[in-house]
Amino acid sequence: MSSLLRGEEMCLAQLFLQSGSAYDCISELGELGLVEFRDLNPSVTAFQRKHVNEIKKCEEMERILVFMYCIITSLAHSLSLSLCLQEQLQRLEVELGEVTRNKEKLQRNLLELTEYTHMLRITRKFVQRTAEVSYEEFPFLEKETMMDYSSMQRLGAKLGFISGLIQRVKIEAFERMLWRVCKGYTILSYAEVEEYLENPDTGEPTKCVVFLISYWGDQIGQKVKKICDCYHCHVYPYPSSNEERNDVVEGLRTRIQDLHTVLNRTEDYLRQVLIKASESVYTWVIQVKKMKAIYYILNLCSFDVTNKCLIAEVWCPVNDIPTLRRALEEGSRKSGATVPSFVNRIPTSDTPPTLIKTNKFTSGFQNIVDAYGVGSYREVNPAPFTIITFPFLFAVMFGDLGHGVIMAVFAAWMVLCENNRKLKNTRNEIWNTFFEGRYIILMMGLFSIYTGLIYNDCFSKSLNIFGSGWSVKAMGWTKEQWENNRFLTLDPNVTGVFKGPYPLGIDPIWNLASNRLTFLNSYKMKMSVILGIIHMSFGVILSTYNYLHFRKKYNLYLVFLPELLFLLCLFGYLVFMILYKWLAFSAKDSRHAPSILIHFINMFLMQGDGLQPLYPGQTGLQIFLVVIAVLSVPVLLLGKPVYLYWLHNGSHRLGLYRVSGYERVRRNSEEELYLMRAHDMEEGSSHRGEDGKTSGSFDFADELLHQAIHTIEYCLGCVSNTASYLRLWALSLAHAQLSEVLWAMVMRVGLRMDSTLGVLFLVPVFGLFAVLTVSILLVMEGLSAFLHALRLHWVEFQNKFYGGTGVKFCPFAFSLLPSSFEHDGLL
């Protein structure tokens, strides 16, 4: 709990690694994830560092693994690889590349032969159809069943043929181009191939068209060939006779059968190679990434003067120093080094990174805080308090027993199935967000159940669990009054009407009252103000823990006390008046109770002598509180800058004492040294060195400007932040009204039908009601309440004590490396 409240105490340490054991030592540290390495070579570019060649080799191995991954994925095999040596990977890459290229070449040849077969089959129909049409013009062709090249030669014409395949989307443009260029000296016949053919460039199935072009003259033939090349047509030789056509078709059939046989054997061999390679793929991927990460860390280290020892600087939690030593000893033992590696803590004035250890329950709430800003080193962390306050404020705006049960059951299912890999490893970003925040949703659902019981609201209906505290019998209404009056008023002043308060929450009779909304508005509005002022006051009180820990006790008197007095004397007094009015005025004299809002306004105007006082001596107390609040403003504005100015001018004689004080700080307490120097930097003290020059200076104008901004922001923020908490009332009212409207316009329609058809009609009505409830009231309203609760914590609560200007601790850990190529963006 102490780590979650303030973070781990960090220290700066030097690692002395022997050259032979440095790789194994860093590998052990990567498995544990204890330290964050600092770059000791900031002026050296990435390409000039010592292990850049090893990193390039790792990248080459990654490239090979990506190549293997693509091949295995394309053949729908499961991955599971292991890293041996770079030579083994390269040998496997060469083998796979050669087999893959041979397979692609065979597939391309098979596609060409298939296209050639389709071309011969379809152009045969073209020639037969042309012969049937042409025999009247050329009588000697009547006996011929085919129009071939030899018959056209007998006409004395220089006739030529070009045949091939073209994509269907290009055929219209291709035909227009032939007509415009060749000016009618060509005849184009084409027909679509019935089956899809594979596109050799994209690998996708495409529709193709077989064409046959008849042309006259060599010049026209050259133009036709160029047009075919421009449109990427697959041109094939056209046989000159029927016998030659039959011979070509028979040869193609035989070659296609042989190619199918060779392709099947090639795929079988490739499958065997991939199965052999896929026995260890994930292990190979992980180990290559580990190697690359280790060499990257080695590039951050520097050598000593003998070039036999590597020196690294790391940030490490103080409590993990013994574990760090054991890891270095284990790394030295694995490498067989004769001289062990060791760690040495060094003092520093640099601000350490912030490390807050969390578990699966607290990590979600810590992420909410870190989204605002990572906490400064060792300042109070709002996350432990957010675990309670965040779901509670959410539930105040989302208070409904039924909706809370649905949300809690959904979150409980995710919690129970949190080890299911299918739920954890999905590519749906929205689902991953819900799953990571399952404990937040669970807490929000449980708190919503509690506030739903307090509001006595379950799907806009009240539950009469303990029996109402109101009785109608004591009013003595007659039968005519019951029949003639739609609304009747219960008077609590009549004996026996009001028996006592409802044991838990709001009495269910208010669900039937015509003034229900007026009553709930007043109750929820005042409750929102009370909760808001308590929440803000708690944030101001938490700032004391920062002042005491960082040894700034003067802030307790010059910052904390004025802030608390200003908040409590004005808005704390407003809470007092609300509670006093609830307790002091009963049902009998409630009509004569004064307005709290009027009294609160008159408190600032110093008026209200003619109004009925809320309690005796009210005017004097209000004047006193206003005076205290007004006097706290100049103290908050000028107190800290004036004190630091006086301390700076009067502390020259303390300079030598402080310099020597640094030297007397215990060597194993970097925390003490850091706090002392931070304290002096805050005070603006000037430390004199041996040359007598000051190492720091104090700027009174800068400090005064900073404090003036803080004072204005705080004083105006007390007003705006208090009003901001009224969103608790507004969203609670909106959620209740939406739930009531949904019930009245959907569910009540189905329940009012008392016939047999009404039972069947109730099924789709309930389905519609469930869908609208989940989509509007749970998802949309839940997201709205979540965002408003987030704003209340970031702006109204955390700014009272939380700086959020720290740097997050980023340890060197193999567990943080991406485990697949998709995360690296390599695919």
Image (tube, rainbow, N blue to C red):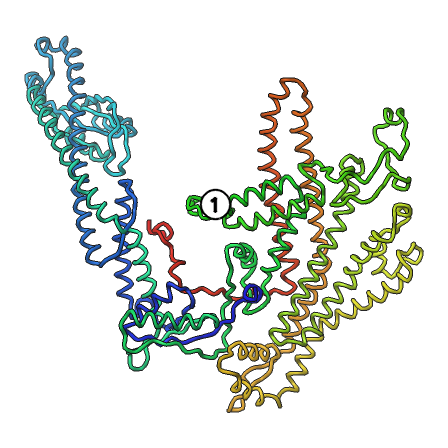
| Coordinates of residue 75 in the picture (x, y in percent) | 26, 40
Location of residue 758 with respect to 699 vertically, above or below: above
Label 1 sits on what residue type? Answer: Cys
Quadrant that contains the N terminus: bottom right
Q: Quadrant of residue 518?
A: top right
| Coordinates of residue 311 in the picture (x, y in percent) | 36, 76
Q: Quadrant of residue 515?
A: top right
Location of residue 352 with respect to 577 vertically, above or below: below
Instruction: Tell me if 600 is positioned left or right of 442 in this view.
Output: right
| Coordinates of residue 434 in the picture (x, y in percent) | 52, 46
Location of residue 81 with respect to 698 vertically, above or below: above
Residue depicted at x 56% and y 50%: 440
Residue depicted at x 30% and y 75%: 18
Q: Quadrant of residue 621?
A: bottom right
Instruction: Tell me if 578 is positioned left or right of 313 in this view.
Output: right
Task: Mark 1: give few (<14), some (14-19) or many (20+) Cα within 10 Å.
Answer: some
Residue extending farthest right: 610
Residue nearer the viewer, 185 or 623: 623
Instruction: Tell me if 74 is positioned left or right of 135 in this view.
Output: right
| Coordinates of residue 299 in the picture (x, y in percent) | 33, 69
Residue bearing the label numbered 1: 417
Instruction: Identify the element where label 1 is drawn.
Output: loop
Residue nearer the viewer, 665 or 540: 665
Residue depicted at x 72% and y 67%: 563
Residue nearer the viewer, 170 or 447: 447
Instruction: Tell me if 592 is positioned left or right of 631 in this view.
Output: right
Residue nearer the viewer, 444 or 663: 444
